[in-house]
Every structure is written in structure tokens, then in C-alpha cells.
Amino acid sequence: MKFKLEINIEQSVVKLNHKDQSILIGSCFSTEIASRLNGSGFSIASNPFGTLFHPEAISNVIQSTITDNIHVDTKQSDDIFHSWDSSGVLFGMADYELIENVLRIRKELKKSLLSAKILVITFGTAWGYNHNELSKVVGNCHKESQDKFTRSLSSINEMEETWLDLIQSLKILNPELQLIFTVSPVRHKKDGLIENNRSKARLLEFVHRIVESTSANYFPAYEILIDELRDYRFYSEDLVHPNSSAVDFVWNKFEKAYCSEETISLSQDIKKIKLSESHKTLYPNSNADVNMKEATSKSKEELLNKYPYLNF
């Protein structure tokens, strides 16, 4: 007797190797997957402009990166400057400092896009906040007065048109780049549960249209959590974000879909070494502690000699 539904995910023709660089951008769920990739020894770039949720906001930062755009829309709050395209983690104590930071990150991201094998994009919501003066969806409202924005639910067609154009630009920049789309399973409670479901429905339809008309991939992170793990014990205290057990479950599905058995085995070896390095002993400098550190160091050295590109 089965007690839960199971999402059957076929092996992808796209295979991720430890030699490859991956870029993850979008909602906080993409950050969670990025941390698992990093912990498994992969080289990654994760949300360089901070957490972004809306397809247009994500498209804006990538498009500005590809085109070498030097314009930055800034906002001042007391003595701190933010970018309307980025989250609050990106800031400057002066206008020029913020602009320098943004342009540096765009340059770094473009370099990564030129060489990366996989770009994972996770959309969080189709509800956008359009800045009335700038006439574009912002990446973050930065606690500004809501009368400066027009909140609206983006249509499937407009999101599709924006991303089809962007994908074409990405493929010109790096023909080998593989795109993997996901929809975040995190519910946007502040929008209201009904409004959140309307938003997710549009994102799902929009993403599948993109996948059907391009060579992009879809990973069902949303369906895994909503259908396969539909129990509140898999959520944190806020009842909307998946807890570490749930993220690990989704990560294992991702790993099996996009990594070979050899790559997964190597990842396990790396995680064992990292776990040993982070171990806090009760008896520092004891014989057991010294022996464990020496064994760990030797294992790490052997792996790096064999695979010098590993991210330790």
C-alpha cells in the first residue's frame, strides 16, 4: 500500500560534472539548492544580486549583464544606497560606491555566463511591483512607500515574451549554456493564499511554455514539495518555507536527475571530508583528534590531486 504520491523524474540528458560551473538565480529556494551544490564541491555563482522573485526582475539583471549596461537605478535611504534591481544585500554608503558594486557584479556574472554549463532559474511569484516613475518591475521595494508602485499580476504572455528574448540572447552569448527552470514551492503568504495560487499557476504555465518552445529543462521542485511532501512537518515554523529535511529531499532528486552515479559518489566523498573538517572534538589535540585531522587532510589531498578543480 502506498501512503504518498511520488514524482517520477527521468534522468536528464544534461549532466553536471564537478568540472562545470553552475549559476543559480532567483528566489530563496535557489539559494538552498546552491548551498547543497557548494557543499558537494561544485563551483557555483549564487544570486549575485540577492534574492529575486519575479520573472521580469530576474530578467532585468541578466539582460543588463549581457548588454554591459552601465546604468544603475539607485535609491537612497538615509545614508545607505540601494539598487532597484537588487535585493537589500547589495548596497553602498554612497551613490558611486553602489554603482561600482553593481557594475563589478555584472562583469563577474557575465564572465560566469560565458563559461557556465548550467543556469538554474527559480521563479517565486508573478505578482510584480512596477515602479511608477521607472516603469519597470523592481527587484525589491526597499521598504519604500507603496504609492510609488503599481502591484499587478503579470500575464503568461508577457512573461513568456520577455524570457524567449532573453534565452535567445543567452544562447548567443554561450551556445553551450543549459537552462533549468524551477518554480519555488515557497508560498507567498503576504499576497494571500488565493493570490499566491493564482501566481504559481501562471508561473507554472509560463515555464512549461518556455520549456516546450526551447531546449530548456524543467525541474519539478514545486510539485515535489506540494504533492509528494504535503505535510507541515516538512516546513519551518512560518509554515511556508521548506525545512532542511525537505530541501535535502528535493536536492537528492535534483542530484539523481542531473548527476551521474560517479559524480554523486564523488560528492559523497567531499561531504564526508567537509563534515570531518567541521567536527568539534571534546578533546582538542588528543591522539584521536590529531589522527582524525591527519586522516582527513590526507583524504582531501588525495582527492585534490586526482580532481584539482574541486571546490573545497
Image (cartoon, helix red, strand yellow):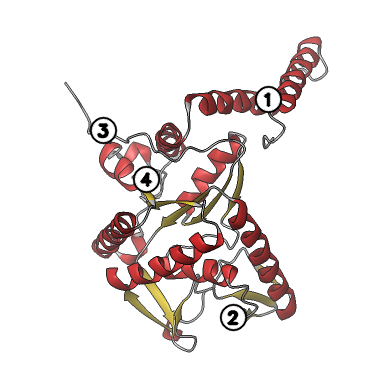
Q: CA distance from mark 4 to mark 3?
A: 14 Å
- Furthest toward the top, the residue is 287
* Residue 279: mark: 1
Looking at the image, which residue is at 72% across and 28% down?
A: 304
The amino acid sitting under disc 2 is Asp
Q: Distance between the Cα atoms at labels 1 and 3?
A: 35 Å
Total numbered labels placed on residues in the image:
4
- Which quadrant holds residue 3? top left
Quadrant (top left, top right, bottom left, bottom right) of the C terminus: top right
Kindly state the secondary structure of the residue where label 3 is placed: loop
Q: Which residue is mark 3?
A: 6
**Numbered disc in front, either 1 or 3:** 3
Residue 81 numbered mark, or none:
none
Mark 1 Cα-neighbour bin, 10 Å: few <14, some 14–19, many ≥20? few
Outermost residue on the left side: it is 1
Q: Nearer the viewer, mark 1 or mark 4?
A: 4
For residue 152, what is the image quadrant? bottom left
Which label belongs to residue 73? Answer: 2
Q: Left or right? Give the position of 56 relative to 211.
A: right
Mark 3–mark 2 CB contact (< 8 Å): no
Lower sequence index among marks 2 and 1:
2
Q: Nearer the viewer, mark 2 or mark 1?
A: 2
**Residue 280 against residue 249 in the figure, above or below:** above
Name the residue: 50% across, 71% down.
60
Depth order, front residue of 294/242: 294
